[in-house]
Amino acid sequence: TPTRLDVVTLFPEYLQPLELSLIGRARQRGMLDVRVHELRTWTHDVHRTVDDSPYGGGPGMIMRPEPWGEAFDELVPEDGPRPRLIVPSPAGRPFTQRMATELAAEPWLMFACGRYEGIDQRVIDHARTRMEVTEVSLGDYVLFGGEVAVLVIVEAVARLIPGVLGNAASIVDESHSDGLLEAPMYTKPAEWRGLEVPEILLSGHHARIVRWKRDRALLRTAQERPDLLAALPSEFFDEYDRSV
Ligand code: 6GU
């Protein structure tokens, strides 16, 4: 049975990339059931209003709660299974490979895309009485809305769902799967514009190549992401690591 993904947004066209490439193929093959819904479906006034000015003052507009409430009522019937609701927000929990792995195990994810200065907090508080809700941030910067964040999250999650990615082995080795950045990669030709592929990779000495890749991963992580290195447990490092 396919993983179900519902996205509620003011701009369904923003989610069109989910029809392409590997995600699109996974949908066609019945591994993903993606449903994009326009929030204005659940408005009733002639202007199809979704926003209003903030109580307490301040700049910009806030999304009114009523359309969201009706959307969840319709998409999540009282008597059925409940999705895990993901609300993209710069105020959310940092999105990581670990969180992607956790989400890939869920049978049903729903995404609520905010625009403007955000969604009335009662939408999240009320949704929490019906389903598990996680506010998720992609990083310490601000986007116009949650749509692009949903594209990122869905791509990171979908490739971890068994059968979506052709080569499952490529997941275990990649950056962030073990807390380190990956070693640099090379392919043919062995010399290009005067630049050579590191000799060890052409040597065929498997054990030495594994060691080299680990050293380069450690070095790269120390240079680019010392925060990741500092977070690893000391048992992670062997005798040799400590000597270099
Ligand atoms: Cl998940 N959403 C929005 N709107 N802005 C963000 C973000 C998410 N992550 C970083 N900035």
Image (cartoon, grey):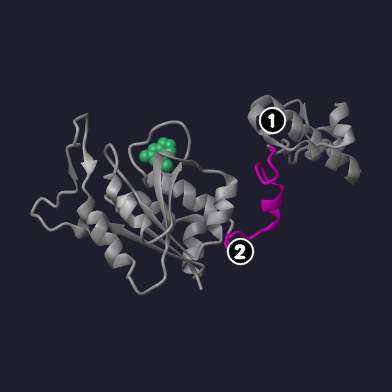
One can see residue 172 in this view = yes
**Mark number displayed over residue 230:** 1
Residue 41 shown left or right of residue 44 in the figure: right
Q: Nearer the viewer, residue 185 or 128?
A: 128
**Residue type at tag 2:** Pro
**Residue type at tag 1:** Ala
User: Can you say whether 28 is above or below 36 in the image?
Assistant: below
Labelled pair 1, 2 in contact (Cβ < 8 Å): no
User: Can you say whether 234 is above or below 46 in the image?
Assistant: above
Q: Secondary structure at mark 1?
A: helix
Q: Secondary structure at mark 2?
A: loop
- Mark 1 to mark 2 CA distance (whole Å): 31 Å
Which one is in front in this view, the residue at disc 1 or the one at disc 2? Answer: 1
Q: Which residue is mark 2?
A: 162
User: Can you say whether 162 is above or below 232 in the image?
Assistant: below
Dividing the image into four equal quarters, which quarter contains ligand 1? top left
Residue 157 shown left or right of residue 92 in the figure: right
**Location of residue 185 (image quadrant):** top right
Task: Please report the bounds of the magenta region as a residue range.
Answer: 161-180
Residue 56 position in % (x across, y down): 19, 32
Residue 154 shown left or right of residue 244 in the figure: left
Q: Main secondary structure of the magenta part?
A: loop
Residue 235 shown left or right of residue 6 in the figure: right
User: Can you say whether 31 is above or below 178 in the image?
Assistant: below
| Residue occupying the point 31% across, 55% down | 126
Is 56 magenta? The answer is no
